[in-house]
Amino acid sequence: MTRDESKKSVFLAYVLWLFGGIFGLHLFYLGRDAHAFLTWSTLGGYGLGWLSDVTKIPRYVRDANDDPKFLAEFVQKVRRNKK
């Protein structure tokens, strides 16, 4: 399997979010297993977590695909918000 074949799809993540989001299917697909388990055990974060994920899916997909731009932005945020 090449690198391009293993890339996660934003479209498929949204389809999974729409039809199985309260069970965390989109999160399991993106490899966010701990987050998915929490979503599954609270039925989508009591609906609020499921709704908030609609805006976060593109970021989750970039994270799952190890997008260099996403990683650089993430490192910047961590450095900026050190405690």
Image: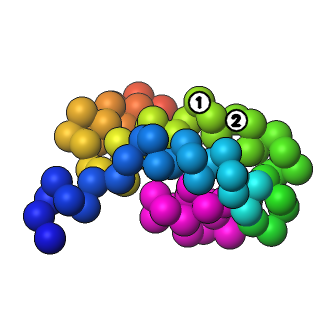
Task: Please tell me how many numbered marks the rendered image carries.
Answer: 2
Dot 2, crowdedness within 10 Å: few (<14), some or many (≥20)? Answer: few
Of all residues, the one furthest to the left in this rendering is 2
Q: Secondary structure at mark 2?
A: helix
Please tell me which residue is depicted at 24% across the width and 33% down the height of the picture. Answer: 69
Q: Which corner quadrant of the image does residue 11 belong to?
A: top left
Of all residues, the one furthest to the right in this rendering is 46
User: Image check: 21 left or right of 29?
Assistant: right
Would you say residue 51 is visible in this rendering? Answer: yes
Q: Amino acid at mark 1?
A: Thr
Please tell me which residue is depicted at 83% across the width and 59% down the height of the picture. Answer: 43
Tell me the colour scheme of the image.
rainbow
Q: What residue would you read off at disc 2? A: 52
Distance from label 2 to label 1 (Cα)? 6 Å
Q: Relative to 73, does residue 25 appear above or below in the rendering?
A: below
In front of the other: 38 or 5: 5
Please tell me which residue is depicted at 47% across the width and 49% down the height of the picture. Answer: 12
- Percent across and percent down for residue 74 are 36, 38
- Percent across and percent down for residue 58 are 45, 36
Please tell me which residue is depicted at 25% across the width and 42% down the height of the picture. Answer: 67
Q: What residue would you read off at disc 1? A: 55
Q: Amino acid at mark 2?
A: Ser
Marks 2 and 1: CB-CB under 8 Å? yes
Magenta stretch, overall SS: helix
- Percent across and percent down for residue 56 are 55, 36
User: Image check: 27 left or right of 81?
Assistant: right
User: Image check: 19 left or right of 16?
Assistant: right
Q: Which residues are magenta?
A: 24-38
User: Image check: 53 left or right of 57?
Assistant: right
Does the segment drawn in magenta span residue 31? yes
